[in-house]
Structure formats: structure tokens, C-alpha cells
Amino acid sequence: GENVEQHPSTLSVQEGDSAVIKCTYSDSASNYFPWYKQELGKRPQLIIDIRSNVGEKKDQRIAVTLNKTAKHFSLHITETQPEDSAVYFCAVSGGSYIPTFGRGTSLIVHP
Amino acid sequence: GAGVSQSPSNKVTEKGKDVELRCDPISGHTALYWYRQSLGQGLEFLIYFQGNSAPDKSGLPSDRFSAERTGGSVSTLTIQRTQQEDSAVYLCASSGGGDEQFFGPGTRLTVL
């Protein structure tokens, strides 16, 4: 089955800095790569996603890049703000209808 | 419109008791997933329902776990003879034909 590795597990940055979280996957048939944000005590919510026919996608301060050859994709957050503090999960699907999630990255943005 | 809802929000039970967790997906969503999230961990897939097809139960950790989805809508996850290691947040998600999953608020289960 699919194997998803997510790094780092914890990321601490100063407000205004950039943050990058990376995920690697194993199934070359995977074609959908979403990122979910989970604030403390809240439900996970989709913040951005990318499909295998696209290399990069941006939405304001967040972007996702995909390298299909190397089987990795990354979440980029620029000009971080305290409200960006949360746990971020990557996920991979396409080879199966069942997504495989990374173990999560706890992002802490210090004011 | 209404999102995915789950009940109860919190459940405390004694070891050995049975529990039922409920999920109301977004109306019209044909796909429904159950996940388990232990403290500081990722989302562990449990079971997947798609329309009237047989569910994919490949993630259920033991035969103490079962789930039903009646009428293609509401789903119930049942854990029999609960153990302390079953303590976790149980999340339900639904999907309406696209790939995005819409999550419920979860049920926090504590087994004493």
C-alpha cells in the first residue's frame, strides 16, 4: 500500500518568516495531493490541493509544489502569522479511493 | 448548508462496555470515511462506504470494531468490549464525488 512520510513533525518560526513542510509518497499511481489544517480542538479542513498534472499551485500566502519524478510534494506558507499555528496534514490518494495521511506537522508561529 | 456532524462530542466509558458513535454526512455525499486520531498522531483509516457498495473494512483494527451506514446516509461506528487503547478522537468525513473530504468535529472517546 501507499506509504506517506511527512517532515518535520514540529516547526517553530517567527511571525513573518516562511514555513515549508514536505511529504514523500511511494505509489506512482497517486494523483491527488491535498493539505489539511487542523487547529487545536477543531476538525481538519482542506487548505490547498494539487493534482498530478500540475507542478505548482498558489492561493495567497500558501502554495503547494509537486515533484512526481521524486514522489514528493511540499506546502509553503509565506509571511506566517500567529493564526497559522496549527497541525498540518498532507494526504495522498488516486491509486486507491482511500487517502493515506501523513503523521502531521505542528507549526508554531511566534509573535 | 450544514456540514458533517457527529455525536456525541465526548464519550467516557468503562473498559469492557460497548459504545456507538454517530456520523451525519453532508446531504447527498455518497462517500463516507471513519478515521481514528490518537493524541499527537495522524489520521488512521478505519472504514470507507461508497453508495450502496460493500464497505472497505480494511482499516478496522479488530473484530470489536464494526460500522453500518443506513440508507446511504447516517453511519454508526460500534466498538464492543472497549479497551483503554481505544481512547482516541474518532473522525468522520464525507465526500461528494470530488476528492475533497469534509470532516466532522469528531467524538473524543475515553475508556477508563
Image (spheres, rainbow, N blue to C red):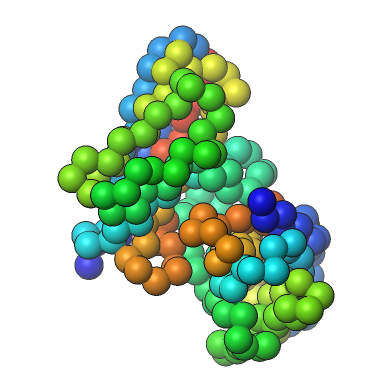
Which image quarter is the C terminus of chain A in? bottom right
Residue situated furthest top in the rendering: B16
Left or right: residue B22 compared with residue B102 = left
Q: Is there any visible trace of residue B20 in the rendered image?
A: yes
Residue A105 screen position, x and y as percent: 71, 59
Residue at the (74%, 61%) spot, across then down: A26
Front position in the image: A47 or B71: B71
Q: Quadrant of residue B22?
A: top left
Residue A98 screen position, x and y as percent: 51, 55
Q: How many marks?
A: 0
Left or right: residue B18 compared with residue A53 = left
Residue B62 screen position, x and y as percent: 53, 24
Residue A2 screen position, x and y as percent: 67, 55
Residue at the (30%, 36%) spot, across then down: B68
Left or right: residue A67 compared with residue B27 = right
Residue at the (40%, 29%) spot, across then down: B66
Q: Quadrant of residue B51?
A: bottom left
Q: Is residue B85 above or below residue A96?
A: above
Front position in the image: A14 or A29: A29
Residue at the (34%, 53%) spot, across then down: B50
Q: Is there any visible trace of residue A50 in the rendered image?
A: no
Residue situated furthest left in the rendering: B71
